[in-house]
Image (tube, grey):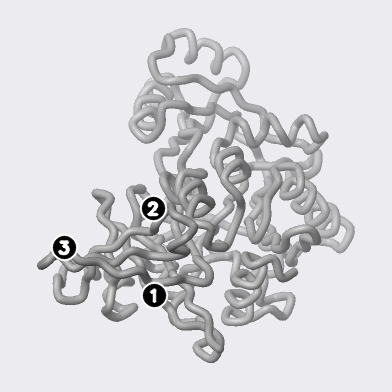
């Protein structure tokens, strides 16, 4: 008997467009012999709809422009419902749609930061990915690095500040510790949104403003010279790592445009590394995953410097677009796209 999986996409996030493309790919590669899909889209202003259209409309970001393809719905926080509530807008009636498992293909704020996971926990429906606590901790780059440093995992140095801070004092501290260039990052944003590479004081000041426009907390990090290595990790109690991949930005740094618009970066899978270095990074990725209490899936990103690997960040709901590294790296170890989705759904239900 087939199970029903709700694929949630969109959301109130700067990564809304990436989510729509990722979810379209997940829906297309879902094993139709095992699962029936319900597509649940969240608009940029937070409205929930069951979407009855095509994945092309999702990929082109026009899914919510045809009212006849939309049904207003919400995920019920009541465990007795164990699914969605679909509303009939004309007469005020509603119906319960039971759901067996949920795949939240949501990136960034309100998607992988623990907020959605809290609702999913209340619903009682099993879901793909990390739990509420792990999602929140992993989303905050400063907390991530603090936890990992306490587990003796090498991390890129940083200083942090919150909105309303003395910006002159922050700039002075950054200059004294790191000089230039430095990277300014929102603490809670993904896909390189809101990141600035500052080469002088003027750029640092504007970078601070940009970071605070995206989050109430930021990090400033020194320019770390090294290769950008990524590892896909999967599992619950027995997590395992993929091969290492390498990002060659072919730009000043791996920003949002390089990732999703210009497609200028080279993504090498597997990365050209000697066996000893690759094994070291793979083991570190699993150690990061475990230290942060992750489950289901995550992509762990490192800089490989002359002094060894250093943790850059972790993504608990990595991209599933055609150019995304997570599915590419899993494919390198023999887990194809459709099989990967099935595995993640099984992990959500506690099947290791």
Residue 275: x and y, percent? 87, 63
Identify the residue shown where x is 71% and y is 33%: 147
Instruction: Tell me which label, 1 or 2, sits earlier in the chain.
Output: 2
Q: Residue at x 58, y 79 (%)?
A: 337
Q: Say whether residue 264 is visible.
A: no
Q: Nearer the viewer, residue 27 or 334?
A: 27
Q: Nearer the viewer, residue 158 or 127?
A: 127
Up-down relation of residue 211 to residue 267 (above or below): above
Q: Which residue is mark 3?
A: 92
Q: Position of residue 350 (x, y in %)?
A: 69, 65
Report whether 240 appears left or right of 79. right
How packed mark 2 is, by other alpha carbons closer than 10 Å (few <14, some 14-19, many 20 or more), is: many
Q: Is residue 91 above or below residue 255?
A: below
Tell me the residue that label 1 is attached to.
Answer: 38
**Disc ID at residue 15:** 2
Mark 3 and mark 2: Cα distance apart in space: 33 Å
In this rendering, the answer to whether 38 lies above or below 314 is below
């Amino acid at each position: 008997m087939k199970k029903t999986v709700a694929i949630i996409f969109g959301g109130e996030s700067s990564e809304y467009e990436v989510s729509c493309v990722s979810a379209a790919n997940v829906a297309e590669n879902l094993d139709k012999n095992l699962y029936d899909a319900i597509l649940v889209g969240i608009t940029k202003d937070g409205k929930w709809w069951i979407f009855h259209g095509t994945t092309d409309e999702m990929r082109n970001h026009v899914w919510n422009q045809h009212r006849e393809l939309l049904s207003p719905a919400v995920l019920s926080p009541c465990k007795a419902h164990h699914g969605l509530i679909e509303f009939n807008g004309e007469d005020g009636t509603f119906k319960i749609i039971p759901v067996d498992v949920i795949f939240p293909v949501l990136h960034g704020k309100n998607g992988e930061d623990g907020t959605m996971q809290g609702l999913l926990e209340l619903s009682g429906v099993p879901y793909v990915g990390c739990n509420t606590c792990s999602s929140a901790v992993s989303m905050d780059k400063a907390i991530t690095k603090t936890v990992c440093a306490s587990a003796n995992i090498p991390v890129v140095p940083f200083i942090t500040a919150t909105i309303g801070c003395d910006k002159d004092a922050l700039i002075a501290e950054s200059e004294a510790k790191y000089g230039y260039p430095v990277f300014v990052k929102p603490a809670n944003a993904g896909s390189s949104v809101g990141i600035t590479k500052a080469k002088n004081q003027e750029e640092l000041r504007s970078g601070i403003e940009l970071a605070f426009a995206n989050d109430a907390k930021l990090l400033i990090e020194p320019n770390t010279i090294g290769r950008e290595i990524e590892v896909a990790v999967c599992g619950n109690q027995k997590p395992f790592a993929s091969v290492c991949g390498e990002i060659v930005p072919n730009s000043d740094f791996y920003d949002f445009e390089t990732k999703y618009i210009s497609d200028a970066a080279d993504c090498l899978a597997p990365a050209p590394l000697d066996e000893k270095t690759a094994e070291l990074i793979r083991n570190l990725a699993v150690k990061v995953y475990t230290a942060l209490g992750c489950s289901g899936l995550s992509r762990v990103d490192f800089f490989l410097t002359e002094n060894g690997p250093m943790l850059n960040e972790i993504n608990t709901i990595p991209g599933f677009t055609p150019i995304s590294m997570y599915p590419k790296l899993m494919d390198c170890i023999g887990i194809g796209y459709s099989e990967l989705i099935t595995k993640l759904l099984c992990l959500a239900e506690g099947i290791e």
